[in-house]
Image (cartoon, grey):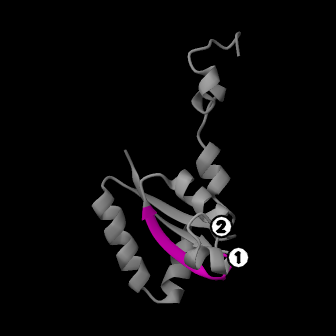
Amino acid sequence: MAFFTYMLASQRNGTLYIGSTEDLIRRVAQHRAGTFGGFTARHGVQLLVWYEAHETRESAFLRERRIKKWNRPWKLRLIEADNPTWRDLYDEFRFGGLSDAASWIPAFAGMSGKEA
């Protein structure tokens, strides 16, 4: 199981939110839906612009806490080092690295290529 530290933005160079989670897809979907209200819902912070994987919940949480203490220019540099155009990484993460439908559609699991 992987754990994640992530940053969301309202737009390029906009409002930032830093968090950590064990289920990045579900958590970003919750932010987008405004499930919990609060800061991200009030400020329209929905674009996944940076994330990193960790082996433990504790290391992801500690990284979140460290980054939250950084000044804004450091956070911007971290984002732009991996994502200079500030593209939304949500769909890339959600569907990235999948070789076939069986990887992400449960109904296709166990089927041969001819059946799918």
What residue range appears in magenta? Answer: 10-20
The type of residue carrying mark 1 is Gln
Q: Residue at x 30, y 55 (%)?
A: 56
Mark 1 / mark 2, whichever is N-terminal: 1
Q: Which residue is mark 1?
A: 11
Is label 1 in a helix, a strand or a loop? loop
- Residue 8, horizontal then vertical, whole percent: 58, 70
User: Height in image: 29 above or below 106?
Assistant: below
Q: Which residue is mark 2?
A: 47
Is label 2 in a helix, a strand or a loop? strand
The type of residue carrying mark 2 is Leu
Q: Residue at x 65, y 63 (%)?
A: 32
* 72 sits left or right of 59 in the view: right
Q: Which mark is residue 109?
A: none
Magenta stretch contains residue 86: no
Q: CB atoms at circles 1 and 2 under 8 Å apart?
A: yes
